[in-house]
Amino acid sequence: MNVADFSGLKLRSLLEHAHIGVVIHNSDTSIVYANPTALRLLGLEYDQILGREAEDPSWYFIDEFSNKLAVCDYPVNKVLSTNSPLSNDVIGRFDTKTHEVIWYLVNAYAESASDIEGRFIVVTFNEISDQRHLFSYRDIVENARDVIIVTDAEQTTHPLGPQIVFVNRAFEELTGYSAEEAIGETPRMLQGKGTDRGSLDRIREALLRQAPIRETILNYSKMGKPYWLELEIFPLSNRFGKVTHFAAIERDVTEKTFYADQLEKRNEDLKALKASLEQMVEQRTRELSAANHTLHKMAHYDDLTGIPNRRSFMDQAQKVRSLARRHAFFLVIGVLDLDHFKKINDEYGHNTGDEVLRSVANLIQGEFRDEDVYGRIGGEEFAFALLTKDSASAEIAAKRLLEAISVKTITVDNQQIQITASIGLAVAEGANQANLERFLKVADEALYEAKDGGRNCWVLRCF
């Protein structure tokens, strides 16, 4: 597609000068246009994005809960799969240069066309990192259980400063002062005759040097009640590196300070309790790790055979397909079905059928290379995806696999079972590839042709 063909020079000029990112995809998700704002927001050059597909492995996105976004949930794929516009989705991109997440507000729609494959998908987006971080940090600070005070750094000496510019709810609950009463005052409003002068001097010197400091001091509430605070003060800088504020995170340690003697007497009990809790935590950690491993295996691997399931196969095959397109390899998608498998279940029982499936899965694992993709996609059906330099290599792989299965003798309960299989192959070279679902459909059609042709054979179809 020629970018100049969109709607004439005026539309092209509008896109080039728009302050919103615009990316246009073909119906196969390949990118045919990105305006300057989109390139700036994504941190890419034009030649780094043009022609790339949505599932290109050189980038990935996350959802608003910081989980990696599945390829099927990318904006362009959502529009294609639902045939509906996408409105105000929030997604993030990890920037490898700054090691930060860049957040975007995304909209997308399909430009009308008479057929689905002729459509263009238009994705527009703006960066909302500042707004998202602002609200996230504000919520965290307001709901923190520790006292948080922020002061201005312009004036730190008595009696003018430092002036309080922010306090959280924990401050109000501990001191009895409202935020309105505290803002504009200095932290000295909380000090009294029992506050240690040495601690105050060390804090003042640290503020003058704009250096962090940790101290424990005695303060007083609005009603005059004393309490001990373990506080940590550190400078806050703006984007130019200038210190503009100081933040103090303070924890009430009154009970720990007043009852140090009692705590010392119970030290041995606490050590024993700590050891017990650590043991419980370690045990629980092991259990959670095992549970997470089990859940991951259930989500990505077939429970019966232990090889990748359909979901995992499809995800990995998409990556192989993208690699084939970039390097102009032939992509081979094969669907293998065991011949007369129902007869095996009927004659020998389902337990025997399960053992046959496990044996075939083990054989498939041994026949393919580490870089090949395979999996059980349902019933007695298996699938594989691999890269070759020509279509003849696909037939060699199919022949080798069928021969290995046909000579395999499976022994179950002293019963010798011989099996055969049929394979449908779909092969296409680099730029001629359709989407993965179309590949599987062609492979399925070839499989049925192999079944009709007498089984224990393969049929290859080229795009």
Image: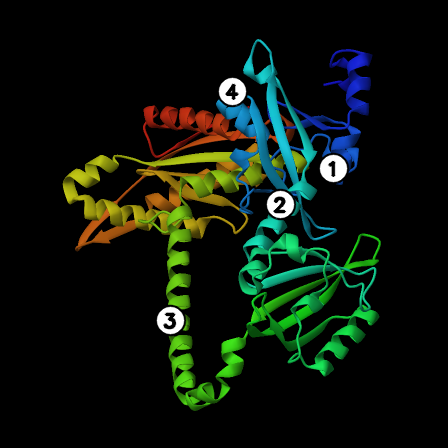
Say if 283 sits above or below 155 in the image.
Answer: below
Label 4 sits on what residue type? Asn
| Residue shown at the point (41%, 87%) measured from the top left | 266
The reply to whether discs 2 and 1 touch (Cβ–Cβ < 8 Å) is: no
The residue where tag 2 is placed is 135
Question: Could you tell me how far apart the alpha carbons at marks 2 and 4 are, in whole angstroms?
Answer: 33 Å
The residue where tag 3 is placed is 283
- Left or right: where does residue 341 sit relative to residue 78? left
Residue 189: % across, % down: 68, 66
The residue where tag 4 is placed is 83
How would you rate the neighbour count of disc 4 (Cα within 10 Å): few for under 14, some for 14-19, many for 20 or more? few
Q: Nearer the viewer, residue 224 or 459?
A: 224
| Residue shown at the point (76%, 19%) measured from the top left | 3
Question: Could you tell me how far apart the alpha carbons at marks 3 and 2 are, in whole angstroms?
Answer: 37 Å
Question: Could you tell me how far apart the alpha carbons at marks 2 and 1 are, in whole angstroms?
Answer: 21 Å
Residue 87: % across, % down: 57, 26
The residue where tag 1 is placed is 41
**Residue 405 visible, this orientation:** yes
Task: Tell me the SS state at disc 4.
Answer: loop
